[in-house]
Image: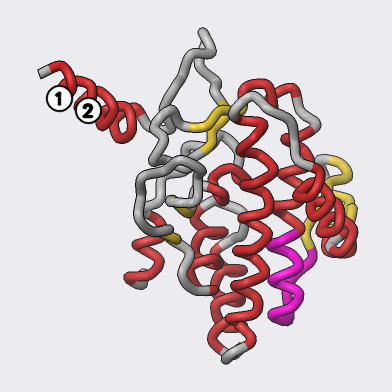
Amino acid sequence: MSIGQLKINAIRLVGGVSVLDYLNTCDGRRPGTSLKAVVDKLSSLEDVVHWFMHAGLIRADEHAQLMRLVQDASWHALTALEQLVAFRESLYQLFLPVALGGAADQRPLGELNRVLALTADQRLLVSTPLGVIWRWRSCHTLEDMTSGFLGRMAVEAAALLTSPDLTRLKACATPDCDWLFIDTSKNGRRRWCQMNVCGAKEKARRAVGQV
């Protein structure tokens, strides 16, 4: 396993759904943050492919095949990375207001609809012993891979927006944390994306303020 893959595998998946975990690969763009710079954990297209494997969205054999596509892509990989990151940021602008108690903004919602339409041909219905299921097409080109990745996130985003789980969508209570999550706690009072990280930092900050 490469150093790059180990780095991506260290990212915790705490959002509750993969699309939120995808949005949680960056920090420093939330309004009001005191962070001085944006820290993006997806700094290359290889990182994106590693992340989709880490999130369980592609198989090991698909990961190996897609890594070969990326390595052969040369400068085209930069364009694909820009598309995937730009869509991630559009989805963040869509979900953050909802997580903070507001309504979905029309502009990122329009972008989601556009991507859903453009990537619709990446999915097909197939018959299996367990019944008919949706399956994502195999990727043979960098364009197929980019479209397939965009489509996966777009479908998950649409599913969340139309799900009862949307009422449980929250933003971490630490202002310097960008992470979003579905609160599945029994009492619905979860405040932090990770109690042992952001929760601990907030408790330490409060303790210092009381001294």
For this view, does 30 lie left or right of residue 118? left
Amino acid found under the numbered disc labelled 2: Arg
| Residue 39 point in image, percent of width and height | 40, 59
Decide whether the magenta segment is chiefly helix, strand or loop. Answer: helix
* Quarter occupied by residue 164: top right
Amino acid found under the numbered disc labelled 1: Val
Alpha-carbon neighbours of circle 1 within 10 Å: few (<14), some, or many (≥20)?
few
Q: Secondary structure at mark 1?
A: helix
Protein image colouring: secondary structure
Residue 141 colored magenta?
Answer: yes
Residue at 59% across, 28% down = 100
Toward the viewer: 158 or 10?
Answer: 158
For this view, does 25 lie left or right of residue 129? left
**Mark 2 and mark 1 residues within 8 Å of each other at the beta carbon:** yes
Q: Which residue is mark 1?
A: 208
**Residue farthest along the top direction in this orientation:** 187
Relative to residue 57, is residue 64 depicted above or below?
Answer: below
Q: Which residue is mark 2?
A: 205
Relative to residue 9, is residue 206 depicted above or below?
Answer: above
Toward the viewer: 187 or 172?
Answer: 172
Residue 124 colored magenta?
Answer: no
